[in-house]
Image (spheres, helix red, strand yellow):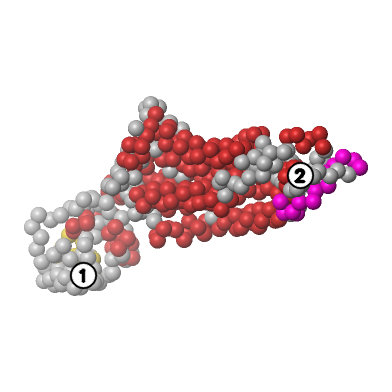
Amino acid sequence: MAWRYLGSLFGSRWNFSSVFQGTIREVEPGCHTIKSHGLQVAKDHKHDWLILLLLVMIAIILLVIHPFYRFVGKDMMDDLKYPLKDNTVPVWAIPIYAVLLPIVIFILFYLRRRDVYDLHHSILGLFFSMLITAVITEAIKDAVGRPRPDFFWRCFPDGKDVYDQWGDVICHGKDSVIREGHKSFPSGHTSWSFAGLGFLSLYLSGKIQAFDRKGHVAKLCIVFLPLLAASLVGVSRVDDYWHHWQDVFAGGLLGLVVAFFCYLQFFPPPYDNNGSGPYAYFKMLEGLRANRQAADSVNVQDAQGMEVVLPQQPSRNNNGFMPLSLDHDATDSLDQMEAGRRSQLLKPLSPTLLLPSNKDDEVHHLFDFSENKALRIPLPEVYVRSVSVPLIPQIFHRFSPSC
């Protein structure tokens, strides 16, 4: 049943309608794409990307420095004589399943939603989860210096153990192999696996609304699938005798905790009603709502403050103009005209507005009753656009009688 649900998400027709519920539908796909907003989103988080580069350099330094060589006595060798084996899961495979696989899934969701906020924040959060986990893991490895279960064969490849006067080992194996043998705690494979796949699990749980209280257990199967893969990687580390079980447990816990905190930096908790998108997405929605409400409020006030009166039988005067009356307060308007304050005619009072008879005429006119002549006064577009009446867009389009 879980596979059937997953197939419904990534089927041939890409039916994601059941995934994006509630507020997530309020903005149509294509509104915030990589092309339109990608560069701006990246600029807004440029400091985060610089910190990522710093974390990369720190992780590289921690990988190459010498770990602490703790005391290893002869009586301790009983737990360190497991055979030296190759890795079931090689190191080069970690970026593939813990980084590239989640990014592919992020891109699939982006292709459906066209939300660059979701794509950018998911990738950024994943990188932070992986690099912070790598820095913490390598720092603890170098500081603790716990020997691996196969340390005996690393230290004495010929099987002949040698100790100094204090009972500490005198290794005669290969230096790089011996150094790697002192990096048992915690497990790097496990911590990195849970950092990447744990982040993916949180991402999927939010996108498919796994905790919507509707009892769809198939969703939980999808959420647990990445965690199961990470757990199997940890088990392989014990089976290969590269780690003690305590190393794997600590590494898995470390990676999962870091992934959870990094996820919460960009996304609401998966059980939240808005868990299907990043914080930036819903912040953008709030801004759109606020702008829409402000525009509606201004339009309502303007509509209440101005009354448009259309003459029932418009006629042209001798100059070829068609009159249109805006009746608001004729007395105040005439008083202003008589006082010589024609500059105030641009306010929504009550001059008679004359439309040009020529459709290509870009000059708009006001008729001055006091002097019985037309004034060639350009009328600003703001004056027209401030009036929110259903008839206005039809009447005032370029102030042409043919509109």
Quarter of the image where one finds residue 85: top right
Residue closest to the eye, 284 or 9? 9
Q: Residue 330: x and y, percent?
A: 24, 54
- Mark 1, residue position: 374
Question: In the figure, is residue 81 to the left or right of 195?
Answer: right
Q: CA distance from mark 2 to mark 1?
A: 112 Å
Q: Is residue 166 magenta?
A: yes
Q: Which residues are magenta?
A: 165-177
Quarter of the image where one finds residue 61: bottom right
Which secondary structure is most common in the magenta stretch?
Answer: loop
Question: In the figure, is residue 94 to the left or right of 6?
Answer: right
Q: Earlier in the sequence, mark 2 or mark 1?
A: 2
Q: Amino acid at mark 1?
A: Ala
Q: Residue 249: x and y, percent?
A: 62, 34
Mark 2 secondary-structure assignment: loop
Mark 1 secondary-structure assignment: strand
Neighbour tally class for label 1: few under 14, some 14-19, many 20 plus, Cα within 10 Å: some
Question: Which residue corresponds to the image point at 50% horizontal and 48% vertical from the top-left?
Answer: 97
Q: Amino acid at mark 2?
A: Gly
On the question of residue 196 being in view, the answer is: yes
Question: Which residue corresponds to the image point at 34% horizontal and 45% vertical from the top-left?
Answer: 10
Question: In the figure, is residue 148 to the left or right of 258?
Answer: right
